[in-house]
Amino acid sequence: MNKRRMLIIGSTGQLGTDMCREARSAGYQVTGVDFPQIDIAERRSVARHVVESKAAYIINCAAYTAVDDCETNRERAFALNADGPGSIAAAAASIGARMVHISTDYVFDGRKTGPYLETDFPNPQSVYGQSKYAGEQQVAAACENHQIFRIAWLYGLHGKNFVFTIRAAAEKKAASGGPLTVVNDQFGTPTSTREVCRQVLKALPADLTGIFHATCEGSCTWFDFAKEIILAAARIPVEVLPCTTDEFPRPAPRPKNSMLENQRLKRAGIAVMTGWKRAFREFLRDEADLREEMCTK
């Protein structure tokens, strides 16, 4: 088996795009696939791509992440977030590959007062969280050689995320002259895709399996993050006001505490996640570079 060969599933998504780039920069021979080229809800489609890849590492970045939509599309959520990863893990095991799967803070109920550890028992409250927890269980059962990374509050250059959404909302409010309200009683850690990719690649060859937490360091509320995005970075002239979760109801319940402690990575001496503000500044530089690159084409 070629130890530098890697298959990344969900390669055109927010995380998968950066995972392909970072892995290639690290010297891996990367094959990226995504829907409709592969359908992770179909076992035969999964098995064919995994077996043909002859990869040493199978990284699954594919998921159904529309949290509110999952509440009314339970069957689809479990097909993509639970059964799909299980099929990928089974196929990975059949060729002796290491299975890497991305999970979420939503597996917890958010009621703990401090950061969640890998040893804390999951208690998901939403269909999305329940389907992702079921995915963790299926991966672990199907492939002994697995690494599962729980991440939270993800943003990156590619795809929809809080950074782009809050900027657009702020610009709209600035044009109309009204204030922007943002939830201030949910705590977590903004985490960039590049930091997650670097951490996964650092842990990948380690003689460690199981579940790992992988978020940037530090914590804040969505309100705090919004102020950093709107006022400190974009400098959009809009008033940002705090509100409670109850004042901004959503179909799917959100964990009030999404803080994760990267305990296992730190104990193993392979934690590389930086502070969330530093990672956000790097994101802004990358965004400016990408904008300049697109302008020169």
Image (cartoon, rainbow, N blue to C red):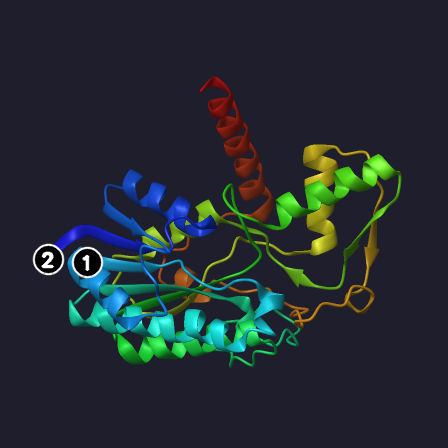
Residue furthest to the front in view is 36
Q: Nearer the viewer, residue 24 or 62?
A: 62
Q: Which of 176 and 149 is in front in this view?
A: 176
**Is residue 223 rendered to the left or right of residue 22?**
right
Up/down of 151 relative to 294, above or below: below
Residue at 28% across / 72% down in the picture?
43
Residue 32, given in percent of the width and then of the height, sits at 30, 49
**Is residue 64 rendered to the left or right of residue 10?**
right
Up/down of 64 relative to 119, above or below: above
Q: Which quarter shows the C terminus? A: top left
Mark 1 — residue?
A: 56
Residue 293, given in percent of the width and then of the height, sits at 47, 24
Mark 2 — residue?
A: 1
Label pair 1/2, CB-CB below 8 angstroms: yes
Residue 266, given in percent of the width and then of the height, sits at 42, 60
Describe the element under mark 2 as helix, strand or loop: loop
Residue 210, given in percent of the width and then of the height, sits at 35, 72
Q: Nearer the viewer, residue 104 or 82?
A: 82
Up/down of 50 relative to 227, above or below: below
Mark 1 vs 2, N-terminal side:
2
Crowding at mark 1 (Cα within 10 Å: few <14, some 14-19, many 20+):
some
